[in-house]
Structure formats: C-alpha cells, structure tokens
Amino acid sequence: MESQNFVPTAAGLASSASGLAALAGACSEALDLNLSEQALSRLARRGSGSACRSIYGGFAEWHQGTDETSFATQVPSNGWEEELSMIFILINAQAKEVSSREGMRRTVETSSFYPGWLSATASDLVKMKQAIAEKDFTALGETTEANALKMHGTTLAAEPPFTYWSSESLRAMECVRMLRKKGLACYFTMDAGPNVKVLCQKQEEQTILRELSAHFASEQLVTAHAGKGLAFLPVEESSAIN
C-alpha cells in the first residue's frame, strides 16, 4: 500500500479522514468485496471516525453508534456545496503534540465540559441540516463557528488540560471576525489542531483571500472546494482517492 496526502499529516487538516476513506475503498476494490457506500463508511470509521463521512462528496452526517451501527449518510443539498469555499490558514504544519485520538480519549474520560458539548451538538446538527436545506449561509456559518468553539472548550477542562490553539490561531480567528465587520460573510472552524479554516461563499473567495494576505504569507493560504467523494483511479493495481 502506498498512501499520499495533499495536506500536512496529523496537523488538524483531516488527513486521516481522507486517507482512511481511500484505504477502505482500495481494500474493497482489491478484495472484490463490492461494498456499498454505507458499508464502506462503516469500515472507514474503524480507522478514523471522521473518515466515515469522506466516502461521500458534499455534506454528510455521521450517525452515532457502535462499530456495527455507526456510519455516515449523504445530506441532500441540491448541489449547494458547489457555491461554497473553504480557505485554510496554515498556522503550523507539523504533527501536533496531542494526537486527535489521545485528545478525544482524554476529553471523553475527564472533561466536565464534554457532556455539555454533546448536548449542544444534537441541537446544532438540527440547525445545520435546516441551514443546508434552506441554503442559509449565515445560519450555516454561525452554527459551524459556534460548535467548533464549544468543541475546543472541552479540552480546557480535561485532565491534564490542553489546547490545540496557538497565539497565531487566535489572531486568525480575530481576522475572520474583522472581515465580518467589513461586511464579508465568512466564519471560522477548526479541527483538532492549530490551523484555522475559513468558510465562505465562492463569490467572495478572492476578496477574502486578498484581505487575509495582508496578515498571512501566501504559502499559508490554501483554498479548497467540495470534493466528489470516494473515486477509483484507472490503474492496474487497486487504488482509491478521496
């Protein structure tokens, strides 16, 4: 097996999500398993929880459960994802000190804030799906940003406490808030790492990039658009990409 990521690995940029989804697809193809998308999603989850969503393109929902009952499904969007953009602000491309797996284990077992985040996530999911159905970018962005902040808040109450944020992460978040005050519709989110992602609409992507370039080097700014989900490469040996 040969694996390649196009984003820094273990830096909070979902490298495990794309990588493990691709591995699940390659295994299914190589072994002639002919797994359905749902079965592939369940298999990918064994390697990385968020990988179960990467089987699909656009929006996907991860259903809570056990190894047998947890998987992701597509969220209907009428192609709205094609109108959206995400700009990565690369703060630190190095592997983080606390891995996602260790950070989540510590948070689940010791953080007094964790139950509150779980409770809030259930209502946030309802808001997100409604925003997608109505193509309401403001609601989508506000819910995305708020949920990310709540997730990162749980790490501060873990034992021992930790955070993925750096001073540069905070500066990037403040830049996004400043852009909103200027009338640009954009919202930040973060995975388990210091790097900040800026959710915006394609029609304002270049304007927001120009604004961010006044604060960050060009090599720190990477633009991404919604992918098509799992795809197979036309090569002799079984391969998959995500």
Image: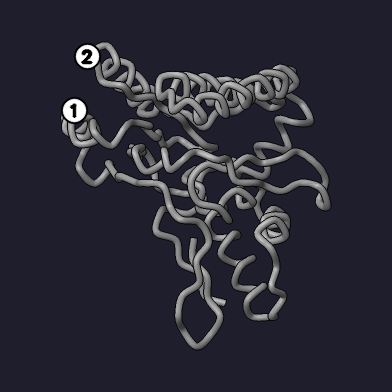
Residue for point 83% across, 52% down = 68
Q: Which residue is mark 2?
A: 182
Q: Which residue is mark 1?
A: 211
Disc nearer the start of the sequence (1/2): 2
- Marker disc for residue 136: none
Q: Tell me where residue 48 appears, x and y as whole percent.
A: 65, 52
Q: Tell me where residue 77 appears, x and y as whole percent.
A: 49, 38
Tag 1–tag 2 contact (CB < 8 Å): yes
Q: Tell me where residue 165 appears, x and y as whole percent.
A: 47, 28
User: Between 67 and 134, which is closer to the camera in this rendering?
Assistant: 134
Can you tell which of label 1 and label 2 is closer to the viewer?
2
Mark 2: amino acid: Lys
Place residue 106 in its image quadrant. top right
Place residue 201 in its image quadrant. top left
Q: Is residue 69 left or right of residue 29?
A: right
Residue for point 39% across, 24% down = 187
Cα–Cα span, label 1 and label 2: 10 Å
